[in-house]
Image: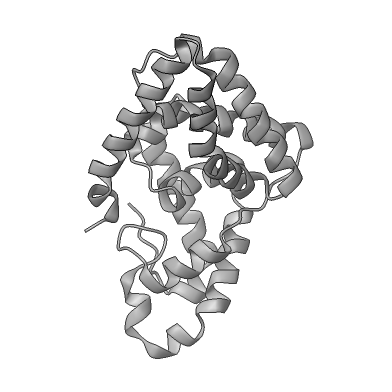
Amino acid sequence: MSNYKKEAPDKKAEAKMDLELVRRCQAGDEAAFGALVCRYQRKVFNVALSMVKDPEDAMDIAQDAFIKVHRYLGSFQGTSSFYTWLYRIVVNLCIDHLRRTGRYASTNFDEKIDHQAHMAEGNGVLSNRQDTNPSKMLGRKELAAQIRVAVEALPPYHRTVIVMREIEGMSYAEIARAMKVSKGTIMSRLHHARKKLQRALGDYLEDSIAVE
């Protein structure tokens, strides 16, 4: 079973705490805004870095994201979680950066991909079958490197949903809200992204990528 469901209660508590801080911010409590920044600055930076690769660019995007949050927090209605709203801001800034620079950005999968190669879920990029063969376990580092190359070659709109789903563990509904598209569109993008990864990694995974 996916770990995403196991994390739901914690995510619900986090969302409740976020909403309390947001309401305090909207009432003029700057300390509450500082608390939101402390809670999410590392995560925002990591998300930006996973999409644009360059640490300086990621830092600039993270700063821009919190500037936007401070500017528009008064209009936040709470119809989605604060993190989904924040994530949408970060992703949009990253996409704008990628379009402006006209290049594909690398994704910082190093530690997380290595972990997935060892503890992969059946519905993720890798299949559990990788761990049943000791000879394949020996090639995990090479596999992780090939996955990074394959993900980096994806178009930004495919790479973004892979990051959201496989790395951040967001649900289809959360990704759809963050990207402002339908759930069906997200499922379609993930399907095509996984098929591209399957083709790129066919020699390494032997059809072990789960294509929904």
Q: Indicate whether 69 appears above or below 198.
A: above
Q: Is residue 80 toward the left or the right of residue 86 in the image?
A: left
Instruction: Give residue 90's quadrant in the image.
Output: top right
The residue sitting at 61% across, 53% down in the picture is 107
Toward the viewer: 183 or 2?
2
Q: Is residue 169 toward the left or the right of residue 8 in the image?
A: right
Toward the viewer: 201 or 178?
178
Q: Is residue 8 toward the left or the right of residue 103 in the image?
A: left
- Quarter the N terminus occupies: bottom left
Instruction: Give residue 211's quadrant in the image.
Output: bottom left
The residue sitting at 41% across, 35% down in the picture is 175
Q: Indicate whether 22 appears above or below 212.
A: above
Residue 121 x/y as whole percent: 32, 63
Residue 149 x/y as whole percent: 63, 62
Residue 53 x/y as whole percent: 68, 50
User: Which residue reaches farthest right?
Assistant: 101
The residue sitting at 57% across, 78% down in the picture is 142
